[in-house]
Amino acid sequence: MGRQEEEGKSRFQAPRGTSDVLPEDEPYWRFVRGTAERVSGLFGYRYIETPMFEDAGVWLRTSGEGTEVVEKEMYLFEDRGGDRLALRPETTASVCRAYVEHGMASRPQPVRLYYFAQKFRYDRPQAGRYRQHTEFGVEAIGDGEAAVDAEVIDLLATFYQALGLAGLSLHLNSIGDRACRPAYIDHLRAYYRDHLSQTCADCRLRYEKNPLRLLDCKQTQCQPVIAGAPAITERLCADCDAHFRALRSSLEALEIEYELDPHLVRGLDYYTRTVFEFLPPEEGAQSTVGGGGRYDGLIELLGGRPTPGIGFGNGIERTILNLKRQKALVPEVEAPRVYVAHASSEARVAALRLARRLRDGGVAAVLGGGRSLKAQLRHADALGARYVAILGEQELAKGEVTLRDMRDGQQHSVAEGEVTAAVAAE
RNA sequence: GUGGGCGUAGCCGAGUGGUCUAAGGCACCUGGUUGUGGCCCAGGAGAUCGCGGGUUCGAAUCCCGCCGUCCACCCCA
């Protein structure tokens, strides 16, 4: 940033990995957000908003030391008072912090929350991956039943359906809990110990730091090793196994198709049992549109009583990317209904007043002027205005307005007081 | 963080060492007489050729660094 200031030459640009949402994209954002709110409401979820930055400990303590998010992707800073803060890299921990802080354990359980939030990660950008992105997410805290897992997945599937996004596939896995995962990891390590020489360099690191990730490696040389690796779903403890079975039968009852993916692992350490992702049909690395899972130990890590929870995050930029790819139709944002033109400078004030009057009547009106009537009509056309109200000497003299219908070019005189009604019809 | 591609007006894009004080299209503005859109016609404005340095008599065109972007890895939404 200092560069531009020092040199005083380059123009400013949005920081790497960030972007501006321009009016052309507004319809998409409006549609996606509106749909998210509507579907969340249908499922009884209430809106929550947490700060964009908080005590870095919220994430340092919960996300896991070996994870990328904590190790190198957080925007960490110290404020003027010396507090160690971080830009929100992940929303679940924030929401859980709020749950604990506001004593939500004393509300009817589970507490169902949804949010629209920006997240920040210092990552190398590419298509579908940004340093700032927006997420629609949901958390159901306080109920460990598999039925809630199914509900959360159903909510996300309903959201996609309402958007008209087709062809997404749901990948599902269970990664066990504190009772059975450590034993599984031991098994996995034992298996890999004999195969490390056949794996890629990254996998040798994963073996040490994040063994579950071994299963997710895409290197071809590692595939045979992965294929022979023990599956966690075959080593779940009785409780986790029962939970996973209950979830699957719930999904089947809801007729939600899923694909069991024993290699599905999520990036944060706090996940337990259920993990899932929705993937679009297209190829590409940055493909996951939405994903989530259960986090039964997270509230405790944040100082609350042991409380189960489950949620998902859905990337809005990726959602919109997919809507565009599928050429989905999204509702257009309405063009102004009336363009108020004035044909003489004497009529300027009258135009101002007419515009005000229209708006008072709930009609969207854009004020023209400052150029020829021809130019104003051209302008009105470019804006897509349905009507042009013309005020000039003639109209002023009679207290009327010439109202032009831009669809067919028909125009007629209307008394000034009747313009709103004339234009509002239909 | 690693490897690679790309970077010419708001957008698309020609031009790859001199004829470039940079083509064309879209968009924008004005006009085509006297108060009227969309088509057409004419005109206009708009370019530090991403930024900085170097090579050369001469660079948008070659080299280096930086920035940005895209692709793959990594990671994830």
Image (cartoon, coloured by chain):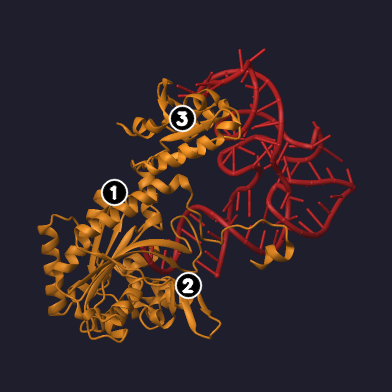
Chain colours: A orange, B red
Chain that bears disc 1: A
Residue found at x 29% / y 81%: A100
Q: Which residue is mark 1?
A: A163
Q: Quadrant of the C terminus of chain A?
A: top left
Image-based side of A290 in relation to B50, left or right = left
- Residue A57, above or below B15: below
Q: Is residue A263 something one can see in this rendering?
A: no
Q: Of discs 1 and 2, which sits in the foreground? A: 1
SS category of the residue bearing label 2:
loop
Q: Amino acid at mark 1?
A: Leu
Chain that bears disc 3: A
Q: Of discs 3 and 1, which sits in the foreground? A: 3
Distance (Cα) linking label 3 and label 1: 37 Å
Distance (Cα) linking label 2 and label 3: 55 Å
Q: Which residue is mark 3?
A: A389
Residue B30's spot in the image, x, y percent? 64, 28
Q: Which residue is mark 2?
A: A73
* Relative depth, front residue between A206 and A325: A325
